[in-house]
Amino acid sequence: MLNRLERIFGRFAIPNLSVYFVIGQVFVLLAAMVQLVDLENVVLVPSLLAHGQWWRAITFLFFVLPPAKAYSYIFLVIKWYLFYLMGNALEHYWGSFRYNVFLGCSILLTIGLAFFAPLEPVTNTYILMSVFFAFAYLNPDFELLLIVIPVKVKWLALLEAIFWVLGFILGSTATRVQIAAPTLTLVLFFGADVVRSMSQGRRAAVRRAERTKEQAQPRHVCHVCGKTDLTNPELDFRYCSKCAGDQCYCPDHIQNHAHVVAPENQSG
């Protein structure tokens, strides 16, 4: 379906969308710091959106709360940089259209589900974090340097997923819908791949179990005493050409055994 949509609407895709998100947030933050913008008029409040304040459906994407401490601006810049890095990587991998669709789904679902908590403000935090999860799924072994320790992004994603689960369980209705919207988008984009990978993993596990079972079975078993190449790997097992079927014998019985006769020869 995405391939068909891209052929029709691909020319309308916005390239470098991550850059516009970062620029918009920087602008809103600076405007709020000099009191040109009231952040209460930027954030999404569904009840106000329903009463004609339509711009909130756009401006909430650029909402950013000014840090309380001066040093916290460093972390904000790092957050913007990582969002740009990962968003740009996704756009390079998917193409501009699919990346637009990914963010668009999260945005539309967030706006739609926000009406379950019509009086509570909604921000863009979880929408932007969905880019991190998508990047981590596609590049699980990518390493981020935390202070001086390199950590694979898949472990950070797992930790963040735990916080999302806790937030969904313990949070308010607004928090739950903000988590649910990008989660549904992630399921739409990656759910089939996850199911396919799990199915392939189960088949691979079955094959490994079968190989392990085969390896646990002896290849050679003495027809007389029952010694095997597993219980006695030092022995040289041989097969008797005069016995009916493939009869194996250990060195002690290869020359000293009663030949096995085929049933038709016995009756004869």
Image (spheres, rainbow, N blue to C red):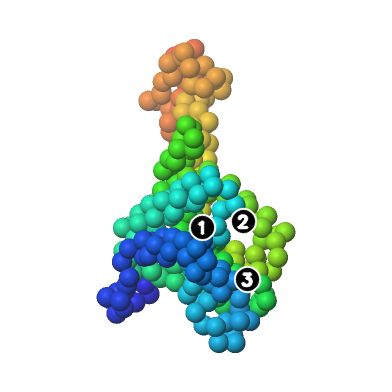
**Vertical relation: 111 (above or below) 68:** below
Q: Is residue 74 visible?
A: yes
Q: Residue at x 47, y 13 (%)?
A: 234
The residue indicated by pointer 1 is: 129
Q: Amino acid at mark 2?
A: Trp
Dividing the picture into quarters, in which one does residue 246 lie?
Answer: top left
- x and y, in percent, of residue 260 in the image: 48, 28
Residue at label 3?
121
Q: Circle 2 is placed at which residue position?
A: 164
Lateral position of residue 166 relative to residue 23, left or right: right
Q: What distance separates the C-alpha of mark 3 from that of mark 1?
A: 18 Å
In the rendered view of the protein, which quadrant contains the N terminus? bottom left
- Foreground of the two, 94 or 263: 94
Q: How many marks?
A: 3
The amino acid on which the numbered mark 1 sits, given as a three-letter code, is Met
**Mark 2 and mark 1: Cα distance apart in space:** 10 Å
Q: Residues within 10 Å of mark 1 (few under 14, many from 20)?
A: some
Of badges 2 and 3, nearer the viewer stands: 3
User: Sequence order check: which comes first, mark 3 or mark 1?
Assistant: 3
Which of the two discs, 2 and 3, labels the residue nearer the N terminus?
3
What residue do we see at 46% from left, 61% from top?
30
